[in-house]
Amino acid sequence: INAEYGCRELLLLVVMWAMGVVTFGSIMFYIEEDQDSDFNSILKACWWAVVTMSTVGYGDLVPKSVPGKLVGSVVVFLSMVFMALPMTIIVSDERELADKQTQ
C-alpha cells in the first residue's frame, strides 16, 4: 500500500489536534486560573488537553470548578469524535487503494 496516500489526511488530523490542544488548554487555563488548582500556566493546561484529548487521562491535572468540569466533559466527547471520524475516512481510502491494487 502506498504510504503517501493518506499523508495529507494524517497531516490535517495532526494540525487540527494541535489546534484543539492549544485552544482547549487556553480555555481551561483562563477558567481555572482563579481557582485553587494546578493550572498555573497555559503550558500545563495544554498538557492537560493533550492527556484528555488522547483519552489517556493520567489524573495529574483535574479541573476543580464546575465550568472547568463542563469544558473537560466537552473536550473528552469531542476528542473521541475527532479521532474516530478521520480514522474511518483514512482506513476506507486505504482499503479502496488496496482493492484497486489487487485488481
Image (cartoon, rainbow, N blue to C red):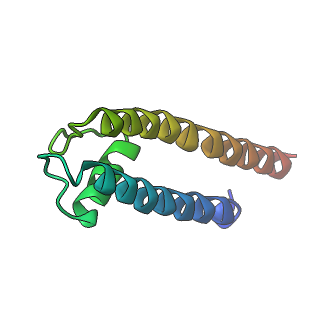
Quadrant in the picture for residue 5: bottom right
The location of residue 67, given as percent across then percent down, is 35, 37
Left or right: 64, with 69 as reference point:
left
Quadrant in the picture for residue 22: bottom left
Quadrant in the picture for residue 52: top left
Q: Is residue 54 visible?
A: no
Residue at point 24%, 40% (across, down): 63
Using the image as rendered, state which of residue 32 and residue 5 is in the foreground.
32
Left or right: 21, with 13 as reference point:
left
Using the image as rendered, state which of residue 12 and residue 3 is in the foreground.
12
The location of residue 75, given as percent across then percent down, is 44, 40
Residue lying farthest to the right in this orientation: 103
Question: In the displayed structure, would residue 73 be above or below residue 19?
Answer: above
Q: Is residue 76 visible?
A: yes
Left or right: 60, with 67 as reference point:
left
Residue at point 22%, 60% (across, down): 44
Residue lying farthest to the front in this orientation: 34
Residue at point 21%, 64% (across, down): 41
